[in-house]
Amino acid sequence: MATGPRRSATPKGVEPLTRRKAWKALHRDYRDSVLSPAVSTRIAIEQASTFGWERYVGSYGQIIGMKTFGASAPLKELQNKFGFEPDRLVAAARDLLGRGKS
């Protein structure tokens, strides 16, 4: 799932989730076809507040995001500090997949 201004660069297999309010307004059958209720393990990566993502990742899912407010530094430093390095994100996704949940 991806949101924000860079969602046009979303990799294949990652579902863009443009706005939560608009998403909620879509027909339930469509939402279920995109985010199947049978899937209990997803990962959400949010370079802002993690608030609200728990309803999308499933009961075994993981949210990687900022849990503090007010950090100020160059982007690369903040990404390193809060765990947004590509290798770390891939490792988290692989760990989640290795748990054997659907």
Image: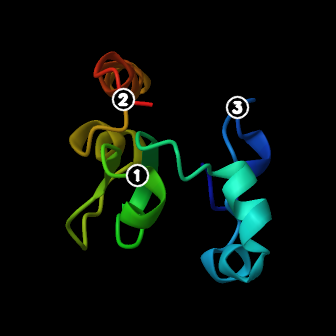
Q: Residue at 60%, 49% (x, y): give it.
A: 1
The C terminus appears in which quarter of the rendering? Answer: top left
| Relative depth, front residue between 95 and 64 | 95
Q: Residue at 42%, 63% (x, y): give it.
A: 53
| Relative depth, front residue between 39 and 8 | 39
- Nearest to N terminus: mark 3 or mark 1: 3
Which type of secondary structure does the marked residue at label 3 adopt? loop
Which type of secondary structure does the marked residue at label 1 adopt? loop
Q: Is residue 94 left or right of residue 22?
A: left
Q: Can residue 6 be seen in this view?
A: no
Crowding near the residue tagged with mark 3, few <14, some 14–19, many ≥20 C-alpha atoms within 10 Å: few
Crowding near the residue tagged with mark 2, few <14, some 14–19, many ≥20 C-alpha atoms within 10 Å: few
- The amino acid at mark 1 is Gly
- Nearest to N terminus: mark 1 or mark 2: 1
Query: Marks 1 and 2: CB-CB under 8 Å?
Result: yes
Distance from disc 1 to disc 2, alpha carbons, whole Å, reads: 10 Å
- Nearest to N terminus: mark 2 or mark 3: 3
Which type of secondary structure does the marked residue at label 2 adopt? loop
Q: Name the residue under label 3.
A: 13
Q: Name the residue under label 1.
A: 58
